[in-house]
Amino acid sequence: MLDNSFPGPDTIHRFELDNGITVLIYKNEASQSIIIDGLVRAGALVETRVIAGLANYTAEMLMRGTKSRAFDEIFEEIESVGATVAFSAGRHVTDFFATGLAEDLDLIL
């Protein structure tokens, strides 16, 4: 008999979005928190000499603000609920990570 309290083929649900991104979801009823961890295959190795550093620059800028919201506003809203959101870029991939309470999922996304 399998124990369904651990991630495995029976407890991980796989979806493919229209844009080709694969999403894996594991629901753990014992926890009220969420963890989002993902990556896209876009890192330094796929950059040409002309756009060298673009993946890293883009990852760094994602939390720096928008036309309608300053960095301080974004940071304060995320921090006020104890959540974490981060982006980084490396040689092979650009990745993102977020944690928080399930009730704050919309805010984190």
Image (cartoon, rainbow, N blue to C red):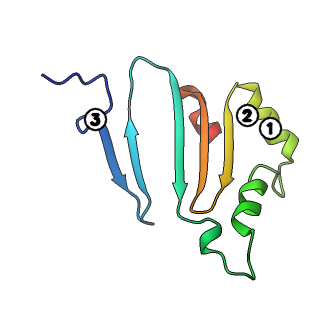
Q: Is residue 83 above or below residue 68?
A: above
> How many discs mark residues in the rendered view?
3
Q: How many angstroms separate mark 1 from mark 2 (CA)?
A: 5 Å
Check disc 1 and give the amino acid type: Phe
Residue at 65% across / 75% down in the picture? 47
Q: Are the residues at dot 2 and dot 3 in contact (C-beta closer than 8 Å)?
A: no
**Element under disc 1:** helix
Q: Nearer the viewer, residue 74 or 35?
A: 35
Q: How many angstroms separate mark 2 from mark 3 (CA)?
A: 31 Å
Please state if 4 lies on the left or on the right of 42 as rendered.
Answer: left
Q: Are the residues at dot 1 and dot 2 in contact (C-beta closer than 8 Å)?
A: yes
Q: Which residue is mark 2?
A: 78
Please state if 95 lies on the left or on the right of 17 as rendered.
Answer: right
**Element under disc 3:** loop
Where on the picture, by quarter, is residue 71? top right
Check disc 2 and give the amino acid type: Ile
Q: Which residue is mark 1?
A: 75
Badge 1 crowding class, 10 Å Cα cut-off, few under 14, some 14 to 19, many 20 or more, is some
Q: Which residue is mark 3?
A: 8
Q: Nearer the viewer, mark 2 or mark 3?
A: 3
